[in-house]
Image (spheres, rainbow, N blue to C red):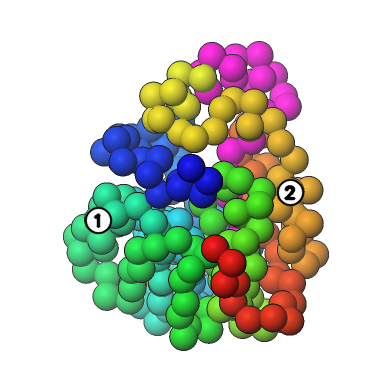
Amino acid sequence: MEGRFDKVYDHSYWKYDFIVNLFQLGRDQLHRTRALKLAGLKKGDNVLDICCGSGLSLEPIQSIIGPEGSILAIDANEKMLSIARKRAEKHHWKNIRFIQGDIRDFHTDQNADFAFFALCWYDPLIGAQWIKQVGHYLKPGKGILCFIDYKYPENWLKNIANPVLKLTVSWLGESYSVEDLKWEPLIEIGSLLDKPEFQTVYLDSLFVLWGKQKTFEDGPDQTA
């Protein structure tokens, strides 16, 4: 069913954090923090955590924005969002608001400084709709969109990447395949941003891409 990525983790939500950290050798939080800093997140910023999942980005974001900032965390999967809420309660974070629903449908009165998309780029068409919708709730001309996601390594690691990736993707029950990782994020995502910047990390298997929002003349997307 087109766009039903909210159902992808219904049976694997309980092992999501484990697999993400296993694949990144326990450095997931480090990589997310690095991505946020590269993109220019700063103390006191208001952040949209897009497809927040189990809340793995919450601590890296909090470590930079502090209690002066705020987070609006959005995800369509109820089970993943429940884990994120429990994570926030455990750390006594009071500056987070959670919304369950499709990114293409959500509305907020928040005028955010920053939107973070971590490991959630599934489909070019839907991703473009997400960016357009989110762009309406970022500060005009100033709001930054930042993406961190997987890509197929182009260095020596590609010789062992296939079996490792196939096992990981299958175990996690992801909606993408190894072939889907052989993509050009700077073209697919970068073309939707204003003056995008790109950097690879973690042996070329992760990328960070960021840039300011493009100007939208119309209102929030109503075509979901």
In front of the other: 6 or 49: 6
Please name the amino acid that badge 2 sits on. Answer: Glu
- Which image quarter holds the C terminus? bottom right
Residue drawn at point x = 78 percent, y = 57 percent: 191
Q: Around disc 1, counting alpha carbons within 10 Å, would you say few (fewer than 14), some (14 to 19), or many (20 or more)?
A: some
Give the image location of residue 124, x and y in percent: 66, 48
Above or below residue 203? Residue 27 is below
Classify mark 1: helix, strand or loop: helix
Q: Please identify the quarter of the rendering in which residue 95 is found.
A: bottom left
Please name the amino acid that badge 1 sits on. Answer: Ser
Q: Can residue 32 be seen in this view?
A: yes
Where does the magenta region start and end? 146-165
In front of the other: 10 or 74: 10
* 113 magenta-colored: no
In front of the other: 13 or 141: 13
Q: In this view, does 92 lie to the left or right of 81?
A: left
Residue wearing tag 1? 82
Q: How far apart are marks 2 and 1 (CA)?
A: 31 Å
Classify mark 2: helix, strand or loop: helix
* 149 magenta-colored: yes
Give the image location of residue 149, x and y in percent: 58, 44
Q: Which circle marks residue 188 in the picture?
A: 2
Number of labelled discs?
A: 2
Residue drawn at point x = 72 percent, y = 24 percent: 155
